[in-house]
Image (cartoon, rainbow, N blue to C red):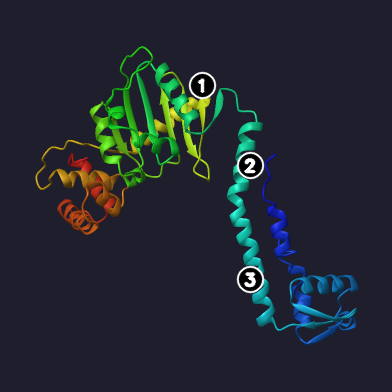
Amino acid sequence: MTDYPDYDRQAADLVPDAPETGDEFSGIYLAMLEQPVVSIADLQRRGFSTTHILDAFDRFASRGMVQRISDDSVRVLPPDVSLPAFAGRLEEFARVLRSSAPGLNRFYLKGLMNDSPAPRGVSRLAGVVDVGQATQQLLATAQHWVRGSRTDTPYTKLLLELPLEFHERKVTNKNNSPLSTRAVLDPILIEHGRFGEVLHARARAGEDQRLTSGLPFSVLVNDQGLAVVDMHAQDDEAIGFFITAGAATGRALTRLVDWTWRLGTPLRHQTREVSGFDARDQQILSLLAGGATDSTIARQLGVSQRTIERRIRRIMDHLNATTRFQAGVLGAKRGLL
């Protein structure tokens, strides 16, 4: 049997009553601050009930805010000492909770994946192997096309690590018939060291590509209504879903992928000369319109960020644009994207 850490006991040992803020004791604590030593009778004269007073004595003693000197009286400790000390214990309690959360969430996700029945037409995927097998089934059953959107999910990052020969092969179905492919890519993937060469390889294999920032997860769909969703858990393990043909969710995901494509900025690897703009300017403008930051563009093109900043200013001046968004719109109108 596997032993799990007793997080509840750790937290309770630190602060016996930490989950409660104790707002109902604020008034009585303010009354106690008016005299260094206070008795039950003193507080009864102030209108507090005996039960409330005894509860407060126990509560404040456990927090190190008062010191008992007899059965019916306590000494109030200086707040500038007792409150910071209590706050320190609360911070330690919060630290234990924060450090416990990822592990507890893993247990929760595993229980959710294993125990809850999946909706009809949906299979849960746990790990990159499951996602990869579902992806191969989706490709095999496609007739004419597959479409996808990808962000930095575990299976997508695994794909970026594969040899270029894998990406240079045309995508085919089970009959070895070539499939039309297009992908919407989140600029966050540019941070991956092999992003550029992998994209060029896939473009050579016939994939159409666009950039769209802020994609929430990766998804692949085909013309038979199948879909594979690739997400990551908090510990960066792959989780996902395989939606089979005929499921309404698959049709909804296809519309989602098509929508992100319409929002995307075309990613062209071969540019034509336009007056005042060289090939690098067009690459910068394409990445900029797709939501990439200056530092990301610099890494993608292998130049310094300062160089990129200067080129962007020059591009904006040449287009007479006052914002980056406006530069993207004007660049599209001039055929630069």
* SS at mark 3 in the image: helix
Coordinates of residue 210 in the picture (x, y in percent): 30, 36
Left or right: 110 as drawn, with respect to 184: right
Alpha-carbon distance for marks 3 and 1? 53 Å
- Read off the residue under disc 1: 244
Q: Quadrant of the N terminus?
A: top right
- Disc number placed over residue 88 in the picture, else none: 3
Alpha-carbon distance for marks 1 and 2? 26 Å
The picture quadrant where one finds residue 267 is top left
* SS at mark 1 in the image: loop
Kind of residue at badge 2: Tyr
- Read off the residue under disc 2: 108
Alpha-carbon distance for marks 3 and 2? 30 Å
Q: Residue at x 46, y 21 (%)?
A: 225
Q: Are marks 3 and 1 in contact (CB under 8 Å)?
A: no
Q: Residue at x 28, y 24 (%)?
A: 169
Q: Residues within 10 Å of mark 2 (few under 14, many from 20)?
A: few
Coordinates of residue 243 in the picture (x, y in percent): 51, 25
Q: Using the rendered image of the protein, determine whether residue 48 is visible from the camera's viewpoint.
A: yes
Q: Nearer the viewer, residue 327 or 129?
A: 129
Of callouts 1 and 2, the N-terminal one: 2
- Disc number placed over residue 35 in the picture, else none: none
Coordinates of residue 61 in the picture (x, y in percent): 79, 74
Nearer the observer, disc 3 or disc 1?
3
